[in-house]
Amino acid sequence: MLNYPVLFVHGMGFRDMKLINYWGRIPKIFTDDGNRVFYGGQDSNGSVEDNALVLKERVETIISETGIQKFNVIAHSKGGLDMRYAICRLGISDHIASLTTINTPHNGSKTIDKILKLPQFPIKFGSACTDIWMRVLGDKNPRTYNVIKSFSTDYADYFNEKNRDIDGIYYQSYACVMKKSSSDIFMWFSHMIVNVIEGENDGFLTPAGVKHGNFKGIVRSNSGRGISHCDEVDMRRRRFTKKEGEGVSDIIELYKDILQSLKDENL
């Protein structure tokens, strides 16, 4: 059992829902170990700044209702940026024991840099349509175009300068990669594009783009599939393969490693 409960912070495109959990089977690993689990509840496509405010309020609400004073935060994708902003800029650093990020764009994406050099009207139009849909799904203030820009390397440089790691908080990060574009029907096209521009990736981000704090390395599967951006949060709700071999056969193994790493740090 950990010394502090776990706060899960989701990434872009999905929300924390009671019926369809963003994290699949993952939270059960922590509750089975005796840990309390909470969720961030920020918008799917909210800006970093807006979502950080929601996370600050969420932390303060949990503290008020339970008396809990510190959390181990586990964040996926953009959720890691949301949480870093909340920690550094919104005064909740005293309540955070650790921040573990999985494929968070800490260093940005060169692919997004190239996309942002293309004519922007189609991107802005598509983002506006996405915002309408996200409001239908429950977002209060979706800002998809703003979110896309927050994945650029220029934004990452600015963000990292303004949101430096806080002493006393343990930071660790993980990267995952797909083995081929056909591995994931939802990520095949983006994986192919990023692979041409930047190299191996999880369908969205490269290992170089997600390194932060104590980088725990690249997590690979022992199947021909690899691990996609969707697989990282157990979207399929099942193991990759029954075969044994080098690499993980189930994404659950990654989170068991995270749990153990937090125990090793006495968190």
Image (tube, rainbow, N blue to C red):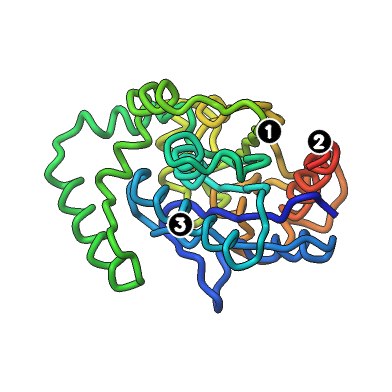
How many neighbours does mark 3 have within 10 angstroms: few (below 14), some (14-19), or many (20 or more)?
A: some
Tell us which disc is closer to us: 2 or 3: 3
Residue annotated with mark 2? 265
Q: Which mark is residue 170?
A: 1
Q: Which residue is mark 3?
A: 57
Observer-nearest of 60 and 162: 60
The disc, 2 or 3, on the residue closer to the chain's N-terminal end is: 3
Q: Position of residue 56 (x, y in %)?
A: 47, 51
Q: Quadrant of residue 14?
A: bottom left
Q: Secondary structure at mark 3?
A: helix
Residue at (43% x, 58% y) in the render: 42
Choose mark 1 or mark 3, whichever is in front: 3
The residue carrying pointer 1 sits among few (fewer than 14), some (14 to 19) or many (20 or more) residues within 10 Å by Cα, namely: some
Q: Quadrant of residue 162?
A: top left
Task: State the SS at label 1.
Answer: strand
Does residue 156 appear left or right of residue 180 in this picture?
left
Sequence-wise, the earlier of marks 2 and 1 is: 1
